[in-house]
Image (cartoon, rainbow, N blue to C red):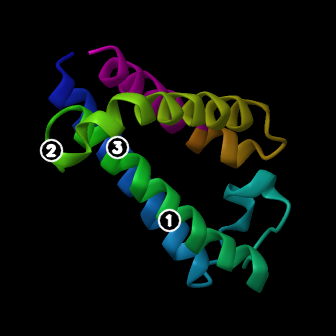
Amino acid sequence: MTLSLAATVFSVLICIVILFQAALAAGMPWGEYAMGGKFPGRLPAPMRAACLVQIVILALLALIVLSKAELLLPGWREFADVAVWFVVTFSVIASVLNLITKSVRERRIWAPVSILMLLSSAVVALG
């Protein structure tokens, strides 16, 4: 897999996650698919605010991967060479959490997504 393809796969997946987080923040009743299923239905206001913070973090991760793959923000390249390992670590943690969650629905949907994000970010990091 080429760096640009891996970075594109990562970015598409993270955009899906961002859209999901935005929907949760807007009040969609999908709480059983997030945060361990602790809040079925509509998330409480503090958790919806947390979704907005997560959106910012996820967008930054995408920018790091795209910069490392030389597809965006060439001025970030030196930063991205180091920061991409944070993205890989974040993806490892996300994969583990999505694999061990008590929420079957969350596990079925987000574990494969987070594993693909891990693999694609690792390809970019090693490239």
Is 71 above or below relative to 21? above
| Mark 1: secondary structure | helix
- The residue at which mark 3 appears reads as 64
2 or 1: tag closer to the N-terminus: 1
Label 1: few (<14), some (14–19) or many (≥20) C-alpha neighbours in 10 Å? many
Label 2: few (<14), some (14–19) or many (≥20) C-alpha neighbours in 10 Å? few
Mark 3 vs mark 2: in front: 2
Is 110 above or below relative to 33? above
Label 3: few (<14), some (14–19) or many (≥20) C-alpha neighbours in 10 Å? many
Is the stretch drawn in magenta largely helix, strand or loop? helix
The residue lying at 36 percent from left, 26 percent from top is 120
The residue lying at 40 percent from left, 58 percent from top is 59
Mark 3 vs mark 1: in front: 3
> Would residue 121 be found to the left or right of residue 43 on screen?
left
Number of labels in the image equals 3
Residue 69 image offset from top left, x and y in percent: 21, 32
Q: Nearer the viewer, residue 77 or 68?
A: 77
**Marks 1 and 3: in contact by CB < 8 Å?**
no
Residue 121, label in figure: none
- The residue at which mark 2 appears reads as 74
Under mark 1, the amino acid is: Ile
Q: CA distance from mark 3 to mark 2?
A: 10 Å
- The residue at which mark 1 appears reads as 55
Under mark 3, the amino acid is: Ile
Q: Which residues are magenta?
A: 111-127
3 or 2: tag closer to the N-terminus: 3
| Mark 3: secondary structure | helix
The question of residue 117 being in magenta is answered with: yes
The residue lying at 58 percent from left, 36 percent from top is 90
Under mark 2, the amino acid is: Pro
Residue 30 image offset from top left, x and y in percent: 65, 68
> Would residue 28 be found to the left or right of residue 31 on screen?
left
